Amino acid sequence: MMSNPDQKTIDWLLDSDPAIRWQVMRDLIHSPEKEIAQERARIFSEGFGAKILELQRTDGTWSGVAWNHGWNSTMHALILLRELGLDPASDAAIQAMKLVRDKVTWKGCGPEECDQNQFFAGEIEPCINGQVAASGAYFNQNVQGIIDRLLGEQLSDGGWNCDAEFGSTRSSFNTTICVLEALLEYEISTGGNPEVKNARLHGQEYLLERHLFRRKSTGKTIEYDRKGGAIWTSFAFPTWWHYDILRGLDYLRKADVTPDERVKEAIELVLSKRNHDGRWHLETHYPGKNLVELNEGVGKSDRWITLRALSVLDWYSARG
């Protein structure tokens, strides 16, 4: 069922930004740790990472706000820097996070009661708080308040939903994946605790019980997200708050889950999208202003999607 990436695909991936190269070296070709670290160290001074860091303002923000409806706010910048793999221990990361921690608040970006909240204290929506906490934990910031809040907001089916405050008792894939990534980053960063791990495993089961894209009640495929209209079988990068099957699989990979029959269909879907040249296309690009353009365009071969797909397949082969 599995096939290793050919050398042409590896060479194509390596002929790119250091943010992609170091992850290829770590996850696909398993280079020596020293070489991986050397490549990763280039992120702050070259390519996508350098461009994003250069856009941070003296007030600590990107685009002047903690969060916005586009993709160029402080929260979105930190999501990208985490996805790129900027080393949290690097001087560049430490300096950038200090500015965010000391200067950025949620004033004008969320409910009025959150106006005075420091950035890493978050606001009230679990999907936004999940994204903030994932980046905050990755960059070794104190997000304990957000984590505690998220633990108290877990629904009985195991997941989370931003509409719970309006009475919803069923979880959302979108919100759940944002929170799961946050809890995982928190565990990696701090060592976690039984309460956090149990909540994460319960949320993880929410996805697995639904085979990552089916309704638990009927087993039918969930063709698209009712709230955002995203098609879960269509792959995007960055995903922002949107769920898709590849994002769900990548979470399981990072969590080092032992795959079972419940992920087989999702893996087969990923394999079915592989092109004759061994690459995957970008299938979706969410509209909105971006800090940097990471992709060549929808319908074109995409290094980020290819990297994520190959990493997921490698995990499945090794752990399945």
Image (spheres, rainbow, N blue to C red):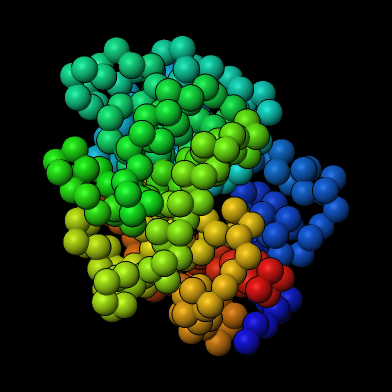
Quarter where residue 235 is shown: bottom left
Confirm whether residue 108 shows in the render.
yes
Residue drawn at (57%, 30%) of the image: 139
Quarter where residue 115 is shown: top left
Q: Is 26 above or below relative to 39?
A: below
Q: How many marks?
A: 0
Residue drawn at (23%, 27%) of the image: 110
Residue drawn at (65%, 34%) of the image: 191
- What is the x, y in percent for residue 197? 55, 43
- What is the x, y in percent for residue 268? 50, 82
The quarter of the rendered structure image containing the C terminus is bottom right
Confirm whether residue 61 shows in the render.
no
The quarter of the rendered structure image containing the N terminus is bottom right
- What is the x, y in percent for residue 224? 25, 68
Q: Is 63 above or below relative to 319?
A: above
Q: Is 175 above or below relative to 284?
A: above
- What is the x, y in percent for residue 34? 85, 45
Query: Left or right of 274: which side holds 220?
Result: left
Front-most of residues 285 and 232: 232
Residue drawn at (41%, 39%) of the image: 131
Front-most of residues 277 and 109: 109
